Image: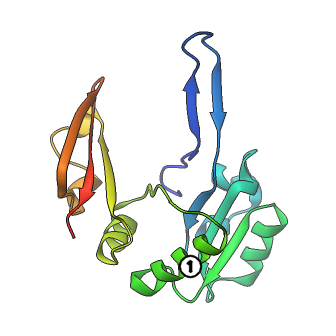
Amino acid sequence: VLADDPALTRRWTDAATGEAHEDCGTRFVFDSQLRTAARPPAAWPRVLADRWRERTVVVTSVAADPAAAARLEAAGVRVWRQETTRGARGWSEFAARCAAERISGVYLEGGAELLADARAAGAATYGFWYRSGADAAGAGWGGRVEWRFAQAVTERLGADTLTRGQFFP
């Protein structure tokens, strides 16, 4: 989130009218130390400050700065505090909270560290690997994550490639 400042929204154009649309489900930001809220609110990443901020949940550890959590909550961002945000214990806590909130599935977009941790904990079962034309040779963060799919499906999306499938256990 700090490196890319993603919107984490769904955007599309109506083919019939050409009208642009945007929508947002629940967005999760995994930030064990609340580094995303360390700056003044005017400098926060867009997921914490845009019109969808009330649909954003920051998953953090109980050791994170309570004042930063309070700033997020005052801005309308939800904060889920867990004993840990990583490893089997962290993913189990996250899954239990999602179940309690009636969230049955999560699309996880993240960097190599978060994705590798989710895979190692068995929390990620199906994967989508988008590679831009510039990354087609296998460079970039994707090369550091175990991307072995059972019955993989690969398709071209313009200059980009999407490979998807069930992860091998």
Q: Residues within 10 Å of mark 1 (few under 14, many from 20)?
A: few
Q: Position of residue 120 (x, y in %)?
A: 29, 76
For label 1, the residue is 96
Q: Is residue 126 above or below residue 139?
A: below
The residue positioned 21% from the left and 41% from the top of the image is: 153
The residue positioned 77% from the left and 80% from the top of the image is: 67
Report whether 154 appears left or right of 56.
left
Report whether 103 appears left or right of 40.
left
Type of colouring: rainbow
Q: Residue furthest right?
A: 74
Q: Residue 42 versus residue 76: which sits nearer the camera? A: 76
Q: Is residue 26 above or below residue 163?
A: below
Q: Is residue 158 above or below residue 114?
A: above
Q: Is residue 34 visible?
A: no
The residue positioned 46% from the left and 78% from the top of the image is: 91
Q: Position of residue 31 (x, y in %)?
A: 55, 71
Q: Is residue 46 above or below residue 11?
A: below
Q: Residue 124 versus residue 78: which sits nearer the camera? A: 124
Report whether 95 appears left or right of 66.
left
